[in-house]
Image: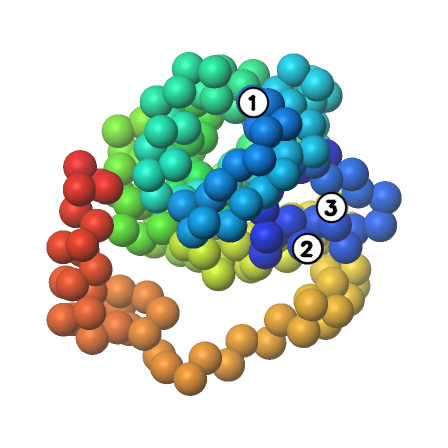
Amino acid sequence: TALDVFGPHHMFILMTGARVELVAPTRELVTADTGIQVMPSTTFEECPEDLTILCVPGGTLGTLQAAKDDKIRNFVADRGSRAEWGASVCTGSIILGAAGLLDGYKATGHWLARDVLEVFGAEPVNERVVIDRNRITGGGVTAGIDFALHLVQELRGTAYAQATQLFAEYDPQPPLNAGSPEKAPKETVKMLEAMHKPFAE
């Protein structure tokens, strides 16, 4: 069982025999930061206690609200501490950290917020995917696909992960080479840092 949305969610659904749930405090429609609406398939109360993967997705203002919400933090702390894998994508690592699940672990997240993980006792790492014991964290947005393929490989083996990658036709060939702060023009990096400074604060 896993909690996730979109990219990684698709990869997990492709695993034969996997049961994927979208978990929220209630079954009410959830509107993501992007405006996309997601219908939870189960609630915190109904969610099984022992999970293979607890995957926390990221976002912007919703992430900050979730990290401050006692009910969400307690749920993530409880299920994540018992899950075979405590996982997150993008800024979801902030929620894992706020729930106490990254203390003493190496972790990553979206580059604009990655350093915030130090507040929670984590060691921020500048990588798309970081695996430290039974914690796996992915960087921003598209890194979620790499993250999910790592988990599929861990759970089903390399051949199965390759078939999943091929089925998803995941063969990135971006028209630009600005996908990380190290590769992007300096003025682009500075612009995004200025725009998102309030989030990091």
Q: Which structural element holds mark 1?
A: loop
69 versus 174 height, above or below: above
Q: Quadrant of residue 69?
A: top left
**Mark toward the start of the polypeptide (2 vs 3):** 2
Badge 2: residue crowd in 10 Å (few <14, some 14–19, many ≥20): many
Q: Which structural element holds mark 2?
A: helix
Q: Residue 119: image x %, image y %?
A: 26, 29
Q: Is residue 62 visible?
A: yes
- Farthest residue to the bottom: give it: 175
Residue labelled with disc 3: 155
Q: Residue at x 45, y 56 (%)?
A: 141
Q: Residue 122: image x %, image y %?
A: 35, 33
Q: CA distance from mark 2 to mark 1?
A: 24 Å
As shown in the figure, which amino acid type bears the numbered disc 2? Met
36 versus 82 height, above or below: below
Residue labelled with disc 1: 25
- The C terminus, quarter of image: top left
CB atoms of marks 2 and 3 within 8 Å: no
Q: Residue 88: image x %, image y %?
A: 50, 41
Which mark is drawn over residue 11?
2
Badge 3: residue crowd in 10 Å (few <14, some 14–19, many ≥20): few
* Residue 69 in the figure: left or right of residue 40: left
Badge 1: residue crowd in 10 Å (few <14, some 14–19, many ≥20): some
* Residue 172 in the figure: left or right of residue 169: left
- The N terminus, quarter of image: top right
Q: Residue at x 32, y 74 (%)?
A: 178
As shown in the figure, which amino acid type bears the numbered disc 1? Pro
As shown in the figure, which amino acid type bears the numbered disc 3? Leu
**Mark toward the start of the polypeptide (2 vs 1):** 2
Q: Residue at x 26, y 65 (%)?
A: 181
